[in-house]
Amino acid sequence: MNFRLYNTMTRQKELFKPLREGEAGIYTCGPTVYHYAHIGNMRSYIAEDGLVRALRFLGFKVKRVMNITDVGHLVSDADTGEDKMEQGARREGKSAWDIAKFYTEAFFSDYYALGCAKPDVVCPATGYIKEMIDLGSALEKKGFTYPIEGDGVYFDTSKLPDYGKLAGKAHIEGIKEGARVETVAGKRHPADFAVWKFAAPGERRQMEWDSPWGRGFPGWHMECSAMAMKHLGETIDVHCGGEDHVAVHHTNEIAQSEGATGKTFSNYWVHVRFLVTGDAGKMSKSSGEFLTLASVTKRGYDPLAYRYYCLLTHYRKQLEFSWEGVEAAARGLDGLRALALKVREEAAGPVPPVEREEKYFKDFSGALADDLNLPAALAVLWETLRDGSIPAARRLAFARAAEEVTALDLFRAPEAAALPPELEALIKEREAARRAKDWKMSDELRKTLAEKGVLIEDTPQGTKWKLIRG
């Protein structure tokens, strides 16, 4: 089946033609591990996981590479300010190395809880300093770089005629110093960016390395080019990231990669739109207020309810976050799982191979092949599970195959929730009040329990309770 993917470079859907038939090399920008990833970050990783799973479902052999930024990402996203790793170390009174280890582990704990499959290659930037220095040396030999005394080595964007082609000419011409790309004394052009940075005079950094230009650390953009080319080749099939990477990070990756090799860096560019929070706009750690996966689970939601919430909106559409939306997604996931379990109970005998020529399978595959239309694919899954005209065993086989893409743990049985001891004590106290016909106390305790997230229902069989999510 032909797979069509929207390419940010050309602003249109294109037939996916990988470098090697039947194979796909994908590079996805990973986290900067100075703090917890927020749920806006996780939306991108869920979408990228969906892309990898969809390609494998459709028969491609996929190699996915993800970087871990543990040095060099300055707070400005350009070339000024404190390194985020050093900032994290100062914030918590730990070493930058300890910060990187802790938040890398925290990231993958959330990542796996959301049903995302482990990348084939995970590469921390600090493990590829040599490759970044080699890339910088190649650029220097070709005349693309210039030094700024006391600051670092910069890429001269004027030397590359098509610089900015990913973001668009109008954007590049509109770059103003003091905006997204900040002022650095000695830069020849506002869009020029760091290949290698020196520590500021009097600054004591925890992460520094020797280089041909002096002791320092790599510019943020260098890591992705160096690692993508090392593991996937000088030209790769697909490069993914959030939409905020288009204007600066990915634009500069293209410049330095193609400047060094003279070849196209990536044939397809895939960008996931922001998760936004009402009037607050896009979620950002720099704002100091952001929601993590722990914010979701503390409200009693399964992490996969958030995955389902993200899958219901196409990755190229902005997703507005609300707790009401998460609650609706949680109920939807509960319903889908109940339906899958019902079909499994109805299926008799061995499960047959999936019928790839059946309409439901083709519709599901067609949705995936149409620029990763996971909302449409989920709709096909719902419709097929409900369709009593299809033998239960075949519906079960299809659901199991679809699970390879959705990763929603469709056949998980509902778990009995447990209450903290103090809430159990309140329920028992209310039951005692009812037996004593102290209706005023009973009502007060019902209200107290509701405020603590427990809904009470009195039935002929006794008192029942339910946790209120949200």
Image: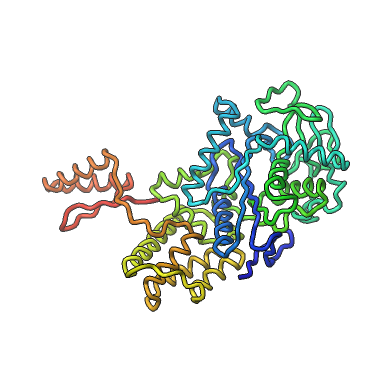
Q: Pick the residue in front: 272 or 367.
A: 367
Q: What color scheme is it?
A: rainbow
Residue projecting furthest to the left: 436
Residue 131's spot in the image, x, y percent?
Answer: 73, 38
Residue 53's spot in the image, x, y percent?
Answer: 55, 58
Q: Pick the residue in front: 181 or 205.
A: 205
Residue at image position (70%, 39%) is 220
Decide: is 284 above or below 243.
above
Decide: is 313 above or below 130.
below
Decide: is 306 above or below 375.
above
Residue 13's spot in the image, x, y percent?
Answer: 68, 66
Residue 402's spot in the image, x, y percent?
Answer: 48, 64
Residue projecting furthest to the bottom: 389
Residue at image position (54%, 53%) is 46
Q: Is residue 440 left or right of residue 396?
A: left
Could you tell me which quadrant the N terminus lies in?
Answer: bottom right
The quadrant where residue 177 appears? top right
Total label count? Answer: 0
Q: Pick the residue in front: 125 or 12.
A: 125
